[in-house]
């Protein structure tokens, strides 16, 4: 077994020698009241301000302030931009940045779209950023996502890891080399203030005042507006005053406010603006995007050209007439243009309202019944990740499909949050069967349960308990029993028994105080997290280019260790009478568990091994997901003929 496979199989369950001791000591201190933590809101605000300070200080070349945001050792991964990844001191990091950034006339970072999760003295956050670099009348801009981690030291949060994902870039990619040459030759452009800002103010106030003529008179007749990050079905450029009039006529009635800041360049007629828009569209929908604009003024003091750079994902989710390309947080789901329709639904499970997505196939007919599937995903996950991806693809093939957030996860109700409890999750699956059974378009005789990763065991048990599930399909299944769990988790100091003890303490604390103790669900630095995955070995839950972000709560209730470690997803195979189909990989998670499960099945069964892909690839990479779904569809479509 190679290193990558081993790490994937363990799903980040490696730890350091002192982790259990630290964990139990920390819990005892919390229980005794010796650790005073700030509120969650205060912690999130402090972390956001920390990152804003880091980027603002970088743009102002205040390197001491930059270093002050960092822990003593920080893991940096800018490999997407050609840099080396690894641990470094703040001094080493700043030294590397100083070798290039001061060589630009201006750097302007626009961090935004924060999602922050705090668990005691550890935290993770994702954010997006537009970073514009200007030099000699030209620019280079990157649109990136950051996956970051933090530690709290003496009540102060410090950056401990920063990992960059490159979404897109625009402009002259040779500028970084020119900037480095400037630094090397000690040719450092001085930072200058923006002075000729009146035309920009006229432009922005015209928008805020909903005054189209005020906007247009701030522009030259041959003005050009470029939008390099604009998605499809949105203009990349507007050429001339007539094109500007047509575009802005459609938005001038929007309620608009812009928080803006101006930056000068060595050319007084070139001004860079960083601004945030708070907008309500004509549909009454909020649209709050972040921008960096580069404005070039004419001799008569009007805007002759401006490059407007914004987050296209926010545009797709908020702008009238636009929508994200696929039905998932990444690109492997069915295209929304495929004819698949998604409806928001709500149903009850043990008195708790669960929020779900119901996918209807193309050319849906309200008087027709369709084969149907319930689709669930990996542990700690939400419907917008793997479930929506697989469900939308299956809907594209003519199925009605349902995804939902389990009790205490995502948008569903339930307290405490983020509890990985098989009892609750099996009950939720059965409640989803109840919901579908009452739907007039569901063919209840062709109802399948499709579980991906950890929910495979939950779906298997639900199948034994509810014969309305006619077929069981498992993709990349994580299937374990107490013996397999112990063989994995005993690798942690304190072992399985230590985690079970911690779970009991967390349950007691919740019963006495109503407060649940949490660790990070996934971390590259914290060995106490549920999934400790160093060196990007398995960053699905952390990377905003994959599945991280506002939908996913990167926390794990400590009480979850007991139901997780004592769960037996394998033995359910002996009680399943329905047909079973499995798609897995030898490089996936716990392949031996899937083999044991398969061998214990007594009824109709089949298994396909997609050994070209690992576990993570079967979560989100389009090629791997397509291969898995092709196998599933081939199995399910002739279901009426199966015995």
Image (tube, grey):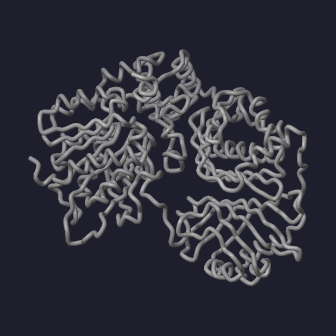
With respect to residue 506, does 57 lie above or below? below
Q: Quarter-wise, where is residue 342 in the image?
A: bottom left
The residue located at (17%, 57%) in the rendering is: 444
Q: Quarter-wise, where is residue 452 in the image?
A: top left
Q: Quarter-wise, where is residue 9 in the image?
A: top left
Residue 561 or 96: which is nearer the viewer?
96
The residue located at (12%, 33%) in the rendering is: 602
Residue 8 or 270: which is nearer the viewer?
270
On screen, residue 416 versus residue 278, left or right, reads: left
Residue 222 in view here:
yes
Q: Position of residue 530 (x, y in %)?
A: 47, 31
With respect to residue 430, does 509 lie above or below? above
The residue located at (66%, 56%) in the rendering is: 170
Q: Position of residue 300 (x, y in %)?
A: 88, 77
The residue located at (65%, 74%) in the rendering is: 255
Residue 227 or 380: which is nearer the viewer?
227
Residue 36 in view here:
no
With respect to residue 238, does 473 lie above or below? above
On screen, residue 349 versus residue 368, left or right, reads: right
Residue 344 or 560: which is nearer the viewer?
344
């Amino acid at each position: 077994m190679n290193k990558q496979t081993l790490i994937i199989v363990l799903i980040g369950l490696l730890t350091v020698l002192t982790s259990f001791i630290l964990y139990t000591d920390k819990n005892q201190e919390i229980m005794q009241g010796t650790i005073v933590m700030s509120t969650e809101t205060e912690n999130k605000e402090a972390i956001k301000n920390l990152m804003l300070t880091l980027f603002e200080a970088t743009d102002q070349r205040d390197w001491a302030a930059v270093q002050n945001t960092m822990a003593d050792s920080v893991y940096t991964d800018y490999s997407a931009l050609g840099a080396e990844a690894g641990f470094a001191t703040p001094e080493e990091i700043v030294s590397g940045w100083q070798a290039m950034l001061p060589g630009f006339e201006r750097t302007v970072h626009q961090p935004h779209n924060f999602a922050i999760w705090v668990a005691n003295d550890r935290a993770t956050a994702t954010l997006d950023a537009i970073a514009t670099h200007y030099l000699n009348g030209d620019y280079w801009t990157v649109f990136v996502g950051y996956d970051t981690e933090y530690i709290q030291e003496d009540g102060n949060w410090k950056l401990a890891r920063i990992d960059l994902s490159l979404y897109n870039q625009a402009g002259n990619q040779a500028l970084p080399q020119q900037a480095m040459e400037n630094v090397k030759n000690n040719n450092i452009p001085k930072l200058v203030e923006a002075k000729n800002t009146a035309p920009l103010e006229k432009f922005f106030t015209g928008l805020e005042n909903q005054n189209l003529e005020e906007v247009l008179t701030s522009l030259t007749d041959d003005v050009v507006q470029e939008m390099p990050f604009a998605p499809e079905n949105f203009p990349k450029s507007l050429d001339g005053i007539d094109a500007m009039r047509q575009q802005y006529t459609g938005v001038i009635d929007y309620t608009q406010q812009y928080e803006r800041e101006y930056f000068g360049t060595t050319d007084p007629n070139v001004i860079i603006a960083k601004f945030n828009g708070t907008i309500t569209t004509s549909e009454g929908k909020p649209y709050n995007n972040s921008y960096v604009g580069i404005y070039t003024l004419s001799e008569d003091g009007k805007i002759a050209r401006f490059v407007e750079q914004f987050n296209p994902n926010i545009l797709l989710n908020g702008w009238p007439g636009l929508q994200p390309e696929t039905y998932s947080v990444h690109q492997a789901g069915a295209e929304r243009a495929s004819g698949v329709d998604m409806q928001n639904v709500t149903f009850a499970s043990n008195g708790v309202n669960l929020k779900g997505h119901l996918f209807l196939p193309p050319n849906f007919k309200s008087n027709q019944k369709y084969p149907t599937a319930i689709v669930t995903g990996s542990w700690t996950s939400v419907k917008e990740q793997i479930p929506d991806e697989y469900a939308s693809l299956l809907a594209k093939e003519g199925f009605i499909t349902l995804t939902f957030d389990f009790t205490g996860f995502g948008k569903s109700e339930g307290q405490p949050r983020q509890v990985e409890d098989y009892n609750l999750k099996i009950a939720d699956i059965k409640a989803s069967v109840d919901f579908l059974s009452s739907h007039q378009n569901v063919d209840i005789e062709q109802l399948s349960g499709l579980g991906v990763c950890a929910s495979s065991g939950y779906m298997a048990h639900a199948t034994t308990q509810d014969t309305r599930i006619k077929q069981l399909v498992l993709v990349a299944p994580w299937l374990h029993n107490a013996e397999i769990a112990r063989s994995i988790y005993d690798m942690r100091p304190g072992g399985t028994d230590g985690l079970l003890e911690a779970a009991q303490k967390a349950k007691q604390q919740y019963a006495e105080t109503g407060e649940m103790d949490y660790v990070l669900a996934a971390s590259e630095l914290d060995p106490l997290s549920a999934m400790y995955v160093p060196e990007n070995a398995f960053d699905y839950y952390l990377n905003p280019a994959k599945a991280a972000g506002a939908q996913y709560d990167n926390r794990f209730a400590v009480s979850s260790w007991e139901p997780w470690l004592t769960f037996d997803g394998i033995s359910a195979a002996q009680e399943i009478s329905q047909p079973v189909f499995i798609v897995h990989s030898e490089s996936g998670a716990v392949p031996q568990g899937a083999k044991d499960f398969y061998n214990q099945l007594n009824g109709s069964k089949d298994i396909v091994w997609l050994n070209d892909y690992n576990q993570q690839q079967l979560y989100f990479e389009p090629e791997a997901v397509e291969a898995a779904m092709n196998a599933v569809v081939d199995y399910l479509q002739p279901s009426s003929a199966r015995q």
